Image (tube, grey):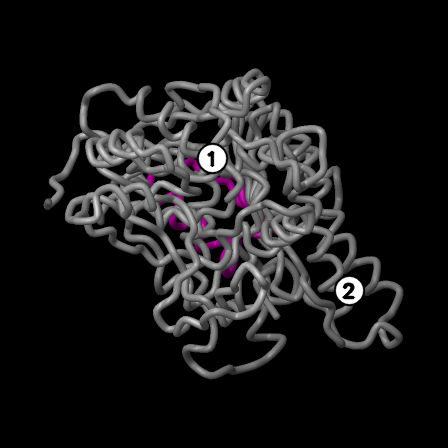
Amino acid sequence: MTATASSKNVAVILAGGVGIRVGLDIPKQLIKIAGRPIIEHTLAVLDAHPEVHEVIIMMAPGHIDAVRAIVRNGGYGKVSRILEGAETRNGTTMRALQALGPEDCKVLFHDAVRPLLNPRIVSECYAALDVYDAVDVAIPSADTIIEVTPENTIRSIPPRASLRRGQTPQAFRASVIKRAYELAGNDPQFATTDDCTVVLRYLPDVPIWVVQGDERNMKVTEPIDVYLADKLFQLFSGTRPLTRTDDGYREALQGKRVVIFGGSYGIGADIATLAAGYGADVCTFSRSSTRTHVERREDVRLAVDQVVETHGGMDLVVNTAGVLPRGTLLGTSEETIYAATEINYLAPIVIAQEVFPHLRESGGSLLLFTSSSYTRGRAGYSLYSSAKAAVVNLTQALADEWAQSGVRVNCINPERTGTPMRAKAFGDEPPGSLLDSETVARASLDALLSGETGHIIDLRRELIGAADAPVDLPGVMGDSPGRDDLMGQV
């Protein structure tokens, strides 16, 4: 049977389990990582995806009120129903299918405890349903898989090349998965752990397409998984936000009040140019252009007051100001230590404090910048690397603190980028070895307009080259080479 396009795309979040193996007194999907409950990370991806029209959440009995609060406080408008799950995975799926009603549609089932879902996978699952009636998601196995006997001896070792590790989501035409479960209901021996197995066993003539998954799309099952998922969010949360068409940017940015600290050169200037070109009201502040020293509270407060007086408030705030001191710590003067720390770390704190009341009023967004060096301190860059690690933690902490106020905080972690500050520090470098400033600036706009918060967004050349195609999504740096342009990334 060949599938045809359906008018509605539904995503079902399967959160019916209680997570006994994690060893906590709440379901694992409600455990907080990276500032949010696990289920909210998952919901945020699906709710923000342009191809998802409706979200149904199947929650563990007794915990529906917690999910209702998450949906209400987060403003997740695509959630249509929050229902109790059953005792088994298959039972929970059947309840979700009953909730769909008689109309055929494309339905995608995803584990709530796979919070690092890449939007690409969602898009490819729905696209595959234009050709196939059932779709699975899997990744190649790097390990050799063995089959054992009841006596714990090896029965066989299947060829690794043909093996895949299954993930979710799994996607179906609703009529097909409903029919498979109808047939399964007549089998007294029916028992499976996923939905594609139901189709494979009871509708064997229906081919199941396999979409390439992602190593980061891990399932939080064991206690160590909570730790690993939190670290993955810290390092990569970072699936790059979906980009927009020119019309989409204009719709999202028209009339938005954008404030950029460190906006005279490099990425800051490129963000300003792009945003203004799409109709935003842009104000830039820097040491060289406005004599604004970002580490001085009185200077930041004066800049904020000027914006409020001129535009009545602010919607999007960016800080790209920074310095890149090089040299060993023992050889660094006390003056340099204080100056670098004040500009690279204290300045983001001051800016955050001063702009928060205005972002709370507008439901706005703050964007900070880190460096790939934050994951591991490097000789010769101790002041810079340690400050960038602090900015990452600041981003995640503020995202958690400000979530109830509706203020989003994210951080861009770009690969080495061609900026005036980097050129001054490192001289000429091989063509093609650096990200270009405008690419980082465009990704910065995507982050500012995203509904996500608490994310550290990785920008690498190979990831950007494979980025999602532009889509229409309605809304929502640098300075002098020696001081205000952060993007001398190392």
* Residue under the point 57% across and 50% down: 456
Up/down of 38 relative to 65, above or below:
below
Judge from the rendering whether residue 319 lies leftward or rightward of residue 210; answer left or right. Answer: right
| Residue beneath disc 2 | 383
The vertical placement of 225 against 383, above or below, is above
Q: Amino acid at mark 1?
A: Ala
Check disc 1 and report the residue beneath it: 44
Magenta highlight on residue 303: no
**What is the three-letter code of the residue carrying label 2?**
Leu
Q: Which residues are magenta?
A: 259-286
Residue 222, position as x, y percentages in the image: 64, 47
Q: Earlier in the sequence, mark 2 or mark 1?
A: 1
Q: Is residue 100 visible?
A: yes
Which quadrant is the C terminus positioned in? bottom right
Identify the secondary structure beneath mark 2.
Answer: helix
Q: Is residue 385 above or below residue 249?
A: below
